[in-house]
Image (tube, rainbow, N blue to C red):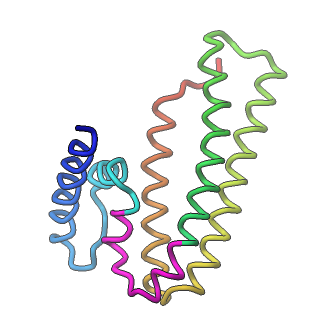
């Protein structure tokens, strides 16, 4: 049942995304809600459909993608743990805890930035420049949607 639901969501996301792509011949993903839906459904399938990689390109690209995903997932877990601490308190933070939270949030951003730099360097070597730029732009858009969702979900420090 879960597999069927996932498949249905993926197909719906792809139909939505293809409608957006049909409007722009360059496959620009500008409908951020459709992008969010497609990523939630199956990010790797979305990336594969947008990138249209040759077998040789795919052999070089997918290991870079997986390494980046692991790094970003680890950074996201750290950030989420820090933000969940904020929410769990449900009261004003002490100054020392506020300092620790700020340090941890900056550390997770720095970790993610290092992962993006590594990704960019690898992708620019592995793919033709236009394909590499397309992927990096797509990752940036995906990250923007995710960052927006996080900003909405977590309150400001009191």
> Is 110 inside the magenta-drawn segment?
no
Predominant secondary structure in magenta?
helix
Rendered position, 124 above or below 35 = below
Residue at figure coordinates x 49%, y 54% from the top left:
143
Question: Which quadrant of the rendered structure holds the C terminus?
Answer: top right
Q: Where is residue 77, by image quadrant?
A: top right
- Which is more toward the observer, 149 or 54? 54
Q: Quick check: 145 left or right of 151?
A: left
Count of numbered circles in the view: 0
Q: Where is residue 98, by image quadrant?
A: top right
Q: Quick check: 82 left or right of 155?
A: right
Q: Where is residue 63, by image quadrant?
A: bottom right
Looking at the rendering, the stretch of residues picked out in magenta corresponds to 45-62
Rendered position, 146 above or below 71 = above
Residue 90 % position (x, y): 61, 11
Residue at figure coordinates x 36%, y 71% from the top left:
48
């Amino acid at each position: 049942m879960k597999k069927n639901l996932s498949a249905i969501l993926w197909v719906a996301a792809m139909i939505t995304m293809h409608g957006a792509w049909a409007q722009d011949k360059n496959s620009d993903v500008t409908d951020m809600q459709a992008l969010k839906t497609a990523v939630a459904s199956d990010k790797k399938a979305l990336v594969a459909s947008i990138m249209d990689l040759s077998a040789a390109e795919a052999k070089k690209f997918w290991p870079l993608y997986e390494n980046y995903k692991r790094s970003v997932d680890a950074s996201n877990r750290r950030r989420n743990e820090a933000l969940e601490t904020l929410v769990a308190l449900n009261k004003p933070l002490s100054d020392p805890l506020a300092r620790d939270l700020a340090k941890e949030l900056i550390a997770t951003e720095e970790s993610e930035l290092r992962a993006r730099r590594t990704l960019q360097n690898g992708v620019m070597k592995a793919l033709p420049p236009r394909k590499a730029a397309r992927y990096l732009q797509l990752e940036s858009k995906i990250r923007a949607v995710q960052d927006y969702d996080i900003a909405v979900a977590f309150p400001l420090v009191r």
